[in-house]
Image (cartoon, rainbow, N blue to C red):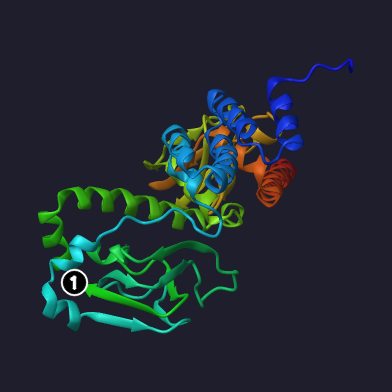
Amino acid sequence: MTGCQHTPRQRLKELCTMHPNDPIFHHQLARHFLDSGHEIRAILQARKAYEILNCEHPEETQGLIDEFGHDITTSHEQPVPSGNYTPLAKKLGRLKYKMRQVHLTEGSILFKKGDHADYVYFIIRGELAVTNHNNQNNLTPSLINFLREGSLLGEGALYGQVRNATVVATTDTTLLKMTPKELQLAFVQNPELHLQFSKESLLRQRVARLTISPAFSCLPTDLRFMLAKRAWDITHPAKKVVKPASQHMTHVELITQGKIRLYEQTTQENRYCGRLDEGSILGLHKIIDGKASQLAYVTKYDCQVICMNFVDVEDLMDVSSRFRERIRNAAASFSTNTARVMSLQEEN
């Protein structure tokens, strides 16, 4: 017997380490994470139990899926699957179906980020990789998703937008192209698939926007999907105080469009101390050091952000060392830069 007392979580973690192939201990730890509000950690732990049971007793996996959701069946290599939209493709009829087919060889590009969005595509067979690759910058492209047979993509055409991602065939692939009008008519006859598509499209767009930040782009695709499912979008109106001086944010925010100005509140005035641009993350100090920034965050114009719960970001920091390092670096860089700006302001 040792003199130290382990917490229930520590005991369960040690049991999982001692018995890495025992699904029961992984299941118990997953339940502990879920009961304490750590949904992402719970899913990742339940996934280990699922993988073991799927090899040993596949008939017992349904109970885990019912308890923790279908995310436990995905992996880094096979991110969240798309829904099956075969009924919509059949609405075009046999003649149009044949005339509208597009054939891609492995490595061929369907469309590039920034291209005009004209058609929506249905995957008849094959696989496509969706990335944020853009020839106009030198950033390393990040994988956003894989899409396989039965999936729809290119929904930006419904709204007259440009493509927000680059799509490449990872194997020989056959697609069916549909005009926005044809797809909308098919949705009228299949309202349940329209609802499914709307939810899926919103989720995929949010995942794509997460990749504008180097911190979130380093996460495996399946973890980005888990985070995006739990996140929510907000548009801050012009001249809104997003965070008062010396107060914590109530959650983490990633700026996806617009800018937020920083002000130091002095006895005489609110002194301008710079701004945060697209890709900047707000609220990290509560996670890193528990200290609230002295600065107030204020919008000048409308600003769009993705909001995330602190516990979800903390879970991802626990499971990804690269993400943890980038979050810490982002917080440290913000502190260093703002402290220097405030020091220079005082010298003037």
105 left or right, relative to 47: left
Could you tell me which secondary element the residue under label 1 belongs to? loop
How far across and down, in percent of the image, does residue 298 sit? 49, 39
Residue sitting nearer the eye, 131 or 51: 51
Name the kind of residue labelled 1 in the image: Thr
Taking 18 as reference, is 74 above or below it?
below
Residue sitting nearer the eye, 127 or 179: 127
Residue at image position (66%, 47%) is 320
How far across and down, in percent of the image, does residue 93 sit? 11, 73
318 left or right, relative to 204: right
Residue at image position (59%, 37%) is 41
163 left or right, relative to 181: right
Residue at image position (70%, 34%) is 16
| Residue position marked by numbered label 1 in the rendering | 179
Which quarter of the picture shows residue 284? top right
Say how many tags the image has: 1
- Quadrant of image for the N terminus: top right
On the question of residue 150 being in view, the answer is yes
Residue sitting nearer the eye, 98 or 278: 98
Q: Which residue lies furthest to the right in this view?
A: 2
Q: Residues within 10 Å of mark 1 (few under 14, many from 20)?
A: few
How far across and down, in percent of the image, does residue 176 sit? 25, 74
On the question of residue 227 being in view, the answer is no
- Quadrant of image for the C terminus: top right
How far across and down, in percent of the image, does residue 302 sit? 38, 47
Residue at image position (72%, 45%) is 332
